[in-house]
Amino acid sequence: MRSDDVCSKYADQKTDLSLTLLPDEEGGKPYILISGPSQALHMLAELLISVADEKENDGFFLGPTGPGSSRFSDMSEFGVYIYRRD
């Protein structure tokens, strides 16, 4: 499935994906917390697979203030850029 098809599949669903910075409690490097209901995580998983498999498109972006903003919760601090390097 193509990345655009994945977005279309979830177009009528409130996915509420959230990416926030999660500090390391021991003072190390922080983590990116990816959270949301199951349909948000399924959507992200399907997008990862679509970028891995889609030969004519090696990257895909969506974020809370740009393309795909309706997929994100208001609490999300980051968007995501998925890029296949091969």
Image: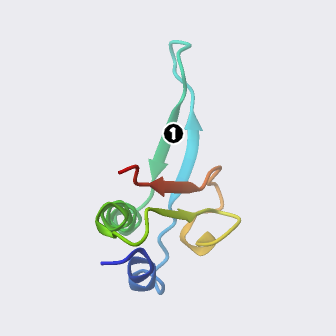
x 36%, y 69%: residue? 39
As rendered, which of 58 and 11 lies closer to the eye? 58
As rendered, which of 41 and 1 lies closer to the eye? 1
Q: Is residue 1 left or right of residue 78?
A: left
Q: Is residue 46 left or right of residue 82?
A: left
Q: Is residue 24 above or below residue 51?
A: above
Crowding at mark 1 (Cα within 10 Å: few <14, some 14-19, many 20+): few
Q: Which residue is situated farthest in the right direction here? A: 65
As rendered, which of 79 and 34 lies closer to the eye? 79
x 56%, y 13%: residue? 27
Q: Amino acid at mark 1?
A: Ile
Q: Quadrant of the N terminus?
A: bottom left
Q: Which residue is mark 1?
A: 32
Q: Position of residue 85 (x, y in %)?
A: 40, 49
Q: Position of residue 5 (x, y in %)?
A: 39, 83
Corner quadrant of residue 3: bottom left
Q: How many marks?
A: 1
Q: Which residue is situated farthest in the top direction here? A: 26
Q: Is residue 22 above or below residue 50?
A: above
Corner quadrant of residue 49: bottom left
Q: Is residue 7 left or right of residue 22?
A: left
Q: Position of residue 26 (x, y in %)?
A: 50, 12
Q: Is residue 33 above or below residue 50?
A: above
x 62%, y 51%: residue? 78
Q: Which element is circle 1 on?
A: strand
